[in-house]
Amino acid sequence: MYTEEDIRKLAWQSRRGMLELDVLFVPFVNEAFRDLNLDDQKRFVDLLACEDQDLFVWLMEREVPENPDHKRIVRIILDRVQPH
């Protein structure tokens, strides 16, 4: 279970300094993170440890992550900001 303090820290960690990532991650943490199940929350936290270059190509849909957990949370993020 993530506390409000944990979520504030995650919001800060979501500020990557790359506009394309910031506009996806920061609102996602603030608006959707609480609604995720615990496994998906953990996937998001793990995703934040990835390199910005990898995150960029995944979230711009230029590549698909090989790691199934990363693939799942990237899809969740994209579906939230780009509903089909």
Image (cartoon, helix red, strand yellow):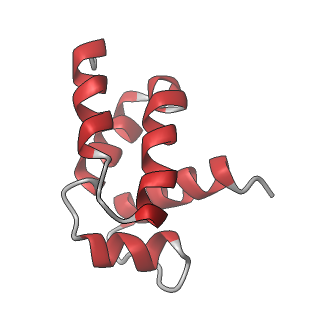
Residue at the location (50% across, 40% down)? 28
Instruction: From this view, report whether residue 43 is shown above or below residue 1.
Output: below
**Total count of labels:** 0
The residue furthest bottom is 62
Q: Quadrant of residue 19?
A: bottom left
Query: Relative to residue 51, is residue 19 drawn left or right?
Result: right
Residue at the location (49% across, 69% down)? 59
Please state which of residues 53 and 20 is positioned toward the viewer in this rendering.
20
- The location of residue 69, given as percent across then percent down, is 36, 58
Q: Quadrant of residue 33?
A: top left
Please state which of residues 11 and 68 is positioned toward the viewer in this rendering.
11
Q: Quadrant of the N terminus?
A: top left
Residue at the location (52% across, 85% down)? 62
- The location of residue 6, given as percent across then percent down, is 23, 23
Instruction: From this view, report whether residue 3 is shown above or below residue 60.
Output: above
Residue at the location (32% across, 35% down)? 11
Instruction: From this view, report whether residue 1 is shown above or below residue 59.
Output: above
Instruction: From this view, report whether residue 33 is shown above or below residue 14.
Output: above
Q: Quadrant of the C terminus?
A: bottom right
The residue furthest right is 84
Please state which of residues 18 and 59 is positioned toward the viewer in this rendering.
18
